[in-house]
Image (cartoon, helix red, strand yellow):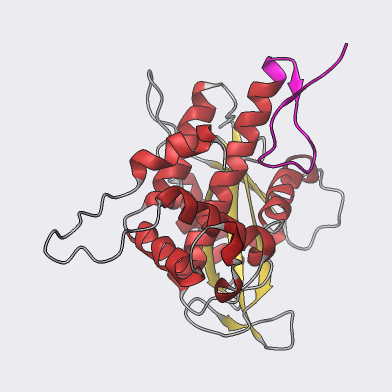
Amino acid sequence: MDDELWARIEPLLPVVPRNPRRPGRQRLDNRKVLCGILFVPYTGIRWEFLPQELGFGWGMTCWRRLRDWNEVGVWQRLHELLLSELRAADLLDFSRAAVYSSHIGAMKGGPATGPSLVDRGKAGSKHHLIVEAHGIPLAAITTGGNRNDVTQLIPLIQAVPPIRDKRGQPLRRPGYLYADRGYDHEVYRDKVCRFQITPHPARRGTGHGSGLGVYQWVVEGAIALLHWFRRLRIRWEIRDDIRHAFVALGCAVICRRRLRTALCREQGQTMRPWGWPARCVRTHT
């Protein structure tokens, strides 16, 4: 983990006071535990298989910190902070947004799962994602695999946090909303219009070639980046709050990548393609 990312996360972490009467063992450093938390979604390994040689602590220690920090909203606040920095760097485009969903298998069941309609009725979940015009994740929701996409359209819009800047009103509502045919419903069109958003879903029953793919591909690419984390391709967590923590952390990492790439380009540098979190390498001219 680089120092810049840690400088953003450290103020968000809660301070746990130590009982002087029963001090017990010294708590493991938060930065080391956070490295262990990031190691699990990147590699997809089980918590109990986290290598002790890395110095990140026991896997269940990382799991408990992930749970506790998610309960106090650390990952959501980190995502909002990075979105605000992206806005300050003029990297957010709220002129339009796009929504999409992706089905994943849920091997152990649990809340926010349901019989899959595309996997012979096996237990599964869905990742519903809304992004802005450049494909930066604004909000994500996890539901059962049998939930209709259009039913999550309003919750996705409401889940977009107010993105603040030093000046001006917070951004929260895009101008246009693009979606595929699964979101085409007159009732939900009216509901979206109440948020002062112009809906542009593809019409049901029409042939392909509507031209919406020009605006829709960004959300499909964002889901592909989200599923680049191996732990997010298949749901192994029974608890839905742990799953939500992984998804929120993945969205925050994607925002951090976009911000860092833009800063490197301004400085005449480039990023190594597979080196996250690699250092910037200056290009030779």
Q: Which residue occupies the extreme left position in the image?
A: 21
The answer to whether residue 220 is left or right of residue 101 is: right
Q: Is residue 91 above or below residue 209?
A: above
The kind of secondary structure the magenta stretch mainly shows is loop
The residue located at (68%, 48%) in the rendering is 222
The residue located at (60%, 30%) in the rendering is 259
- The answer to which quarter of the image holds residue 273 is top right
Task: Indicate yes or no whether the magenta region holds residue 237.
Answer: no
Q: Pick the residue in front: 41 or 177.
A: 41
The answer to whether residue 185 is left or right of residue 156 is: right
Q: How many marks?
A: 0
The answer to whether residue 64 is left or right of residue 110 is: left
| Res. 71 visible in picture | yes
Q: Pick the residue in front: 237 or 132.
A: 237
Q: Position of residue 224 (x, y in %)?
A: 73, 54
Q: Position of residue 265 (x, y in %)?
A: 71, 20
The residue located at (54%, 76%) in the rendering is 237
| Res. 172 visible in picture | no
Q: Quadrant of the N terminus?
A: top right
Q: Pick the residue in front: 283 or 187.
A: 283
Q: Pick the residue in front: 17 or 227.
A: 17
Q: State which region is magenta.
A: 265-285
Q: Position of residue 51 (x, y in %)?
A: 61, 66
Q: Quadrant of the C terminus?
A: top right
- The answer to which quarter of the image holds residue 176 is top right
